Amino acid sequence: MAEEYTFPVLVELEESKTPRLKNKLVKYFQSKKSNGGDCEVDYESGSSTALLRFLREEDQKNVLGKESHQISLDEGVLKMAVRLPSDGKQKQVRAKKWKLIFPLILICMLLEEYPQLKPQHTSLT
């Protein structure tokens, strides 16, 4: 069974046009420097926020408990503020996951109910 990253943290970022910022956020929040741990990062390039989801509640609490967070970049230091997301943001994340999973569930159910829908394997020789 897949591990669940269910302990969210919202990161508010200063304006940054840094390429591959998502990778830098992952590296930072999975490091001891942030007091973090195993996490997933949702970040759209150019956005002023990122949503982290930690595997362990302890890592979430440690990140929230750290006074300041910053990443050294080529163009300077990126300062970040962290907090728990509002309930609306958490519901948005759940809805996004559901939108991705629902079609797969539906396909599995249809294939189980209607085996004739399964693709027929043919030889191309």
Image (tube, grey):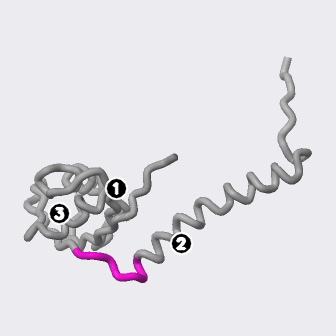
Q: Is residue 63 magenta?
A: no
Query: How far is the residue under mark 1 from the one under mark 3?
Result: 13 Å
For the residue marked with disc 3, what is the amino acid? Asn
Q: Residues within 10 Å of mark 2 (few under 14, many from 20)?
A: few
* Marks 2, 1: nearer the viewer: 1
Residue in the picture at 86% in, 27% down: 122
Asked if residue 98 lies left or right of residue 11, the reply is: right
Residue 105's place in the image compared with 87, above or below, is above
Instruction: Specify start and end residues of the magenta stretch as a single range.
Output: 83-89
Instruction: Pinpoint residue 104: horizontal percent, then vertical percent.
Output: 67, 55
Residue in the picture at 21% in, 66% down: 61
Residue 85's place in the image compared with 110, above or below, is below
For the residue marked with disc 2, what is the amino acid? Ala
Q: Is residue 87 magenta?
A: yes
- Which residue does the numbered mark 3 point to in the structure image? 62
Which residue, as the protein is rendered here, is positioned at the far top?
A: 125
Residue in the picture at 85% in, 22% down: 123
Instruction: Pinpoint residue 89: horizontal percent, then vertical percent.
Output: 40, 78
Instruction: Pinpoint residue 106: horizontal percent, then vertical percent.
Output: 73, 59
Sequence-wise, the earlier of marks 3 and 2 is 3
Query: How far is the residue under mark 2 from the one under mark 1?
Result: 19 Å
- Which residue does the numbered mark 1 point to in the structure image? 55
For the residue marked with disc 1, what is the amino acid? Leu
- Which residue does the numbered mark 2 point to in the structure image? 95
